[in-house]
Image: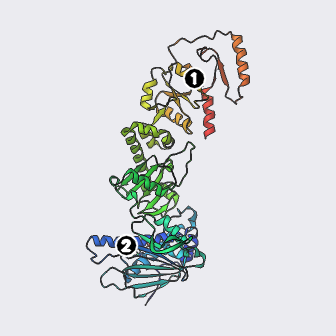
Amino acid sequence: MQKGQIGVTTENIFPVIKKFLYSDNEIFLRELVANAIDATQKLKTLASFGEFKGELGDMRVEVKVDKDAGTLTVTDHGIGMTADDVNKYINQIAFSGAEEFVNKYKDNANSIIGHFGLGFYSAFMVSKRVEIRTLSYKDGAEAVRWDCDGSPEYTMEPCDKSTRGTEITLWIDDDNKEYLEQSRIDMLLKKYCRFLPVPVVSGKEQEWKDGKYEDTDRDKVINSTEPAWTRKPADLTDEDYRNFYHELYPGQEDPLFWIHLNVDYPFNLTGILYFPKIKSNLDIRKDRIQLYCNQVFVTDSVEGVVPEFMMLLQGVIDSPDIPLNVSRSYLQSDRAVKKISGYITKKVASRLEDLFKADRSDFESKWDDIKIFIEYGMLTDEKFCDAALKFTLLRDTEGKYFTLDEYKTLVEASQTDKDGNVVYIYATDPVEQYSYIEAANAKGYNVLLMNGQLDGHFISMLENKLEKTTFVRVDSNVADNLVVKEERKDSGLSADQISLLTSIFRSQLPKLEKCEFMVSFESLDPAASPVLITQNEYMRRMKDMAATQ
Ligand code: ADP
């Protein structure tokens, strides 16, 4: 029997690991299952290169709870380990890696992303003792048993394991008895392992019998091994994409459309992003996109990995290149992550442009649902903004949609003011501003509908982006001051009459701080609207902006 001291200089690393990771200790299971999957995949790869000629046999990974014995066991039929391997990977490298990790972060616990893995020794977060029994795939290999009770001392000896692969048994400690409940384990496996590439079984399928659920003798498979994002877009139908969406987010309406991401240079990334129906209220529900690393769930908190406005999307991103065992601030400044974020932005913009070009009327029909996303993106991301100027639509009060270029062409001739600015007139409330819209239309002006939650900011942004363009609200004083080639009609009222009528109207209007209403009787055709009440455009806009800050 070999006895040894685990290769660490710290007297005992386990109390540190335990304390340090306490809040997130459930990830031990993900780490162990991920190792089991790796070992399985490695053997399959060796077999495909002809370096393993034996029978692969049943390659399922099993997670077994034995409440009476107080143990949880993860078993695989992968490559296994020789005694040398255990020395190298478990006794040396693994533990020294943990020490380095803990030293680096022990003063900085709060900034840790919280979803990282410490690999194999995460097991010690929840166990008082861990045993490995393993038999390597190599010809003539001898099975090894390794045992460690949480002190830096371990024992290692030959054992009688006859099946290839590794079996890791955890004696769950008293503080973590929850991990001896099959239901808790099921929940964790569903969270972290539901899309792993090798079948994972745990517990038994249940059947409704005699008024209650009972175990059958069929093993319960936790995962679907080929989730949509790992397949080729050409092999997937719209139905497949929709089904996958509902698998991720049960009970939600169909998504509007989706983007299949697939890149292998300069980083690896796959995934599917869905555009959900975003309700008119700006509900930026974060944590909707799920981040995976080689099909292992990592987190659904993707701030820093995708641009802020993408948080309105849903779906899956899978990348082995996103560093996970680092703090959030590091993640945000990481160059690989920045590249990933830039790539996703570009891809989303070009997909939107494709959709727009391929089927304009379909794009228009979805516009009202995606508008808030696009506006948010344009307001917060310069690059996205420049790309989106091509497919951004403006909608007028009659429900017609125009690109920015089209709209300019439409109104340029009749809506240019004396300084040469093209004036875009817009309404924010088509019911309340009905008579103004009518009046503007009667003059041959087009009126845009800008009643979205971000439209105030969006308008300012467009004014900056588009040359010589100003926006004015249909009920503002400016809308009526456009240079038009028609004669202004006189109301025929005397100055006294105007002053009297103005004070009568003013007395009925709400008092607004620094934003007076203007009343005029001469500007519009008296037959249509004899009185026009307007607000100073500049002051009004300042107020609106302040209100939506
Ligand atoms: P990581 O998985 O990040 O390399 P771990 O601490 O989880 O770190 O594991 C260290 C090494 O131990 C692995 O790289 C692998 O070589 C070996 N190992 C762990 N679990 C298994 C297993 N179930 N089968 C075979 N080898 C394993």
Residue neighbourhood size for the residue with mark 2, other residues' Cα within 10 Å, grouped as few (<14), some (14–19), many (≥20): many
Q: What SS does tag 2 mark?
A: helix
Label tally = 2
Position of residue 428 measured from the top left corner of the image (x, y, whole percent): 58, 32
Position of residue 20 measured from the top left corner of the image (x, y, whole percent): 57, 70
Q: Quadrant of ligand 1?
A: bottom left
Q: Is residue 153 above or below residue 527?
A: below
| CA separation in Å, label 1 and label 2 | 72 Å
Instruction: Name the residue carrying label 2.
Output: 40
From the viewer's perspective, is 369 left or right of 500? left
Q: Which residue: 58% across, 73% down?
A: 178
Q: Can you tell which of label 1 and label 2 is closer to the viewer?
A: 2
- Which image quarter holds the C terminus? top right
Q: Is residue 386 among what the camera can see?
A: no
From the viewer's perspective, is 111 left or right of 242? right
Q: Which mark is residue 478?
A: 1
Of 391 and 541, nearer the camera is 391
Residue at mark 1: C-beta within 8 A of ligand 1: no
Q: What SS does tag 1 mark?
A: helix
Q: Amino acid at mark 1?
A: Val
Position of residue 132 measured from the top left corner of the image (x, y, whole percent): 45, 81
Q: Which mark is residue 32?
A: none
Of 46 and 8, nearer the camera is 46
Q: Which residue: 71% across, 16% down?
A: 501
